[in-house]
Amino acid sequence: MSHYTRLDVSPKGVEVTYALDLAEVPTYTLLRDWKLDAKSPQAELESKAAEQARAWADGLEFQAAGKPIQPKLVSTAIKLSDGAGGLAVARMVSTFQLDGVKSPLTFEDHNFPERAGWKEIVIRSGQGAAITKASHGDVDRSKALTEYPVDPLSAPPQDLRASVEWKATNTPLISQQSPRVITPIRQPKPVEPAAAAPPPSSTPNVPQAPGTVVKGDYLSRLVAMKEIPLSWLLAGLIVAFGFGAAHALTPGHGKTIVAAYLVGSRGTLKHAAFLGAMVTFTHTISVFLLGLGVLFLSNIVKPEKITPVLGAVSGLSIVVVGASLFFKRWKSLRAAAALADAHAHGIAHSHSHDHAHAHHRHTHDHHHHHAHDHHHHHDPDHHHPDHGAHGHSHVPDGDITLGSLIALGASGGLVPCPSALVLLLASISFGHVGAGLILLVAFSLGLAGVLMAIGMMVLYAKSWLPDPQKTSRHPAFRLVPVVSAAVIVCIGLLMTGVSLGWVRPGLVG
C-alpha cells in the first residue's frame, strides 16, 4: 500500500492532499468491509470512500506550534481499475484543510505502518508564504502515485513524518485609485481536485520481482475465464509451478537456512525431500486458511496483521532449532577437543583382555596365566583402526531430527506469498475454487522444488569435500557444524526482527 502526502502552506492555513494506492488484497478486503464490489455504482463507492477518509484522518497527526490540529475533510474521490488476477485495485485521494494554523507544523502518518510500499511526502509553499525550514522538498517523484519511477537503483521513499516552518511574505496589492491593472496579481496554484484523481497504478517503483502475478499475465487471464478449458488449466499448472520456483529465488523462504542446516548435519536426499514436502504442505495450508479468513472473517482476519505474526513465529522456530543445534555441536566440539588434548599429553590406555590375541603365541601347559602388562602409547596424531563399538570420532554425531526438519520446512512455507493469495482470491471471486486450489498447490510445489534443489546441491557439494574422518583434526573443519548452527540462529533472529518491524527488510535467505 503506497502513501502520498502533499502539504501546501499559505497565510490562511495548510491544504493537505492525501492519496493511498491500494493493491489487490487490501482493495478486496476494503470492498468486502463496505459490502460493495468493483461493479457497484460510483455514487455508493464515493459515499463509502468519504466515510473511510474520515476514519483515516484519525491516523493523521498534525501539530501546529505544539498544539494538535484536527484536519477538516474537503473532498474525496476513489477510482477502481483492474489489477493482478482480475482483482480490482483502488486509488483514493482526499483533500483536508488546516485552517488558521501557525508555524511550525509537524505531521505523522500512522495509517498502515506495517504495509510495504511507496511512502512519499511533498511540501510546497503557496502565494503569500515562504518556507524557511522543511524536512522534505517540493519535488513530486511519483506525481501523486500516478507515475512511479522505474529506476531499479532508486529505493522507494519511506516518509511518514514531516515538519515545516514558514513565514508570510509581502504580496503586492492593487491600489483602489488605479482604474487599470497593469500587473495582475499572481494567483496561488490551484490544488489538484480530488475528483480528477488519476486511476490507481499497480506499477511499482522497480520492476516486479520474479514469480509475481501481475495484471494481464497468463494466470490473471486464466482465472478470469468463465470456463477454463483443461488444456489451459494444465498449462496454468506449469506456469504456476514456474512462478513458485521463481518466487523462491527472491530473498526469503529459508534457502540460506536449509543450506546451513544440511552443511553442518549428516543430511541425506531423503531429508532434503522431506523439507520440500513440508514447505509445500505448510505454504498451501497457510495461504488457504488466510484466504478463507479474508473471505469470511474480513473484520477479524487482516493479512497485514497476520503475516507479521506468522513471520515472527517462523523466525522464532528457526532460532529454537538453531540454538539447539549450536549447543549440541558446541558440546560435541568441546568433548572432541578435550579428548585430543588428553592424547596430546600422552595418557596411556590400558586394555585388559580375557580373550586370545592372534599375534601372541602361548603355551598352555601351565596355569593358563597370561600377563599382558604392555601399554598402547599414542601420539597426538594417532588413529584407531578398529575399536568396534567403542570407536570415537572428532566429528559431531548426526543431529538430523524429525522435529528440526518439520520446523525448518514449516519456516520456509509458513508466511504466505502475496501472489499466491491473490491467485487464490481471484479464483474464488470468479467461481473457480477447485482450479484456484490446484494452482496454489502447483505454486507451492515450485517454491518447495527450489529448496529441495538447493538441499541436494549442498549434499552433492559435500561429497566433494575431504573425508570427515581425515579432516576431523583440522580446526576449520571441526568448526563448520558449530558455525552453521550460529548462522541459523542469526538468520532466525533477523527474520523475527524484520517481521516485527524492528529491522528494515533485507536479504534474508
Image (cartoon, grey):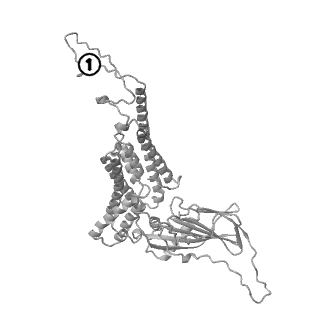
User: Taking 160 as reference, is 440 left or right?
Assistant: left
Q: Nearer the viewer, residue 47 or 337?
A: 337
Q: Is residue 62 visible?
A: no
Please state the horizontal and vertical placement of residue 74, each as a whole percent of the image.
Answer: 60, 73
Please state the horizontal and vertical placement of residue 166, each as a whole percent of the image.
Answer: 71, 67
Tell me if residue 423 comes above or below residue 46 in the rendering: above
Q: Nearer the viewer, residue 395 or 121?
A: 395
Q: Quadrant of residue 465?
A: top left
Please state the horizontal and vertical placement of residue 71, each as a whole percent of the image.
Answer: 63, 67
As helix, strand or loop, the secondary structure at mark 1 comes to loop
Amino acid type of the residue tagged 1 in the rendering: Asp
Residue beneath label 1, please? 354
Q: Is residue 196 visible?
A: yes
Please state the horizontal and vertical placement of residue 252, each as a whole percent of the image.
Answer: 43, 55
Q: Nearer the viewer, residue 31 or 445?
A: 445
- The residue most toward the right is 177
**What residue is shown at x 48% (from left), y 66% (from top)?**
206
Q: How many marks?
A: 1
User: Taking 278 as reference, is 309 left or right?
Assistant: right
Around disc 1, counting alpha carbons within 10 Å, would you say few (fewer than 14), some (14 to 19), or many (20 or more)? few
- The residue most toward the left is 365
**What residue is shown at x 34% (from left), y 20% (from top)?**
375
Q: Quadrant of residue 241?
A: bottom left
